Image: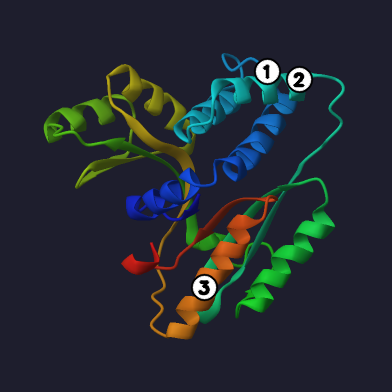
Amino acid sequence: MSGHSKWSTIKRKKEATDGARAKVFTKIGREIMVAVKEGGPDPSSNSKLRDLIAKAKSNNVPNDNIDRVIKKAAGESDKTNYEENVYEGYGPSGVAVIVECLTDNKNRTAADVRHYFDKFGGNMGTSGCVSFMFTSKGVIVVENTGLDEEKVMEDVFDLGATDFNIEGDSVEITTEPADMGTVRDGLTEKGYKILQAEVEKVPSTYTTLTDEDAIRKMGLLLEHLEDNDDVQNVWHNWDMPEEAE
């Protein structure tokens, strides 16, 4: 998942991952393994695992694959330990970038991430250098099949959402991070079709790039970061042009 809470960007990433589901599941699989080792294999008592199973299903990951990873992580034979690392920096023209990783070799991952920043006109900074520009929010996108706005408003606020926005064929609902799973489950019970549900880092301001070379390099930076198996999420405040989405 990359970028910010605009559904056009989410949709772009979802369309891209439809052609590369193996890579997507590699990333989600790591998150599931960490969640199982931290909170156990039962999603009814492990809310983080429950959220990740929903995330996997929204990315069309088969149930058999999900079950296999949970069983592997719960077994004593699996000795792989993934460590969470977050890197912050700037892309071309000062675009703020946060890179969230799960890795079994942090030296390799740090070197890779730094290389991408350097190669494509940016620079990796220190912890906290850009994170103050972002706020964590639960973002849920549901399909708009001619929904009644007043009914949507009643449902989302009754469930504890903080805001919603109807735009075209989708409805974007925001929540407090801790409430995302509860609101998502409640919407599902009410018959809404969930397209995306995730806690995202939403920027307070956006940076527009006008220089063609900067746009090209920023696109390549995001592409290389997202292609790295150790990278789970990339958040940025680039106000991406439609043709880049």
- Residue assigned mark 3: 218
Specify the amino acid type for callout 1: Pro
**Residue 101 visible somewhere in the drawing:** yes
Cα gap from disc 3 to disc 1, whole angstroms: 39 Å
Left or right side of 163 for 100? right
Q: Is residue 42 left or right of residue 238?
A: right
Q: Position of residue 237 (x, y in %)?
A: 45, 65
- Tag 2: residue type? Ala
Residue labelled with disc 2 = 74
Tag 2, which secondary structure?
Answer: helix
Q: Are marks 3 and 1 in contact (CB under 8 Å)?
A: no
Q: Which mark is residue 41?
A: 1
Residue located 62% across and 61% down the image: 225
- Going from the N terminus, do you reach mark 3 or mark 1 first? 1
Up the image or down, 184 lies above or below 89; here it is above
Q: Residue at x 46, y 77 (%)?
A: 215
Label 3 crowding class (10 Å Cα cut-off): few <14, some 14-19, many 20+?
many
In primary-sequence order, the first of circles 2 and 3 is 2
Q: Tell which residue pokes out farthest to the front in this image.
A: 19
Which residue is at a point 68% across and 62% down the rendered structure image?
A: 127
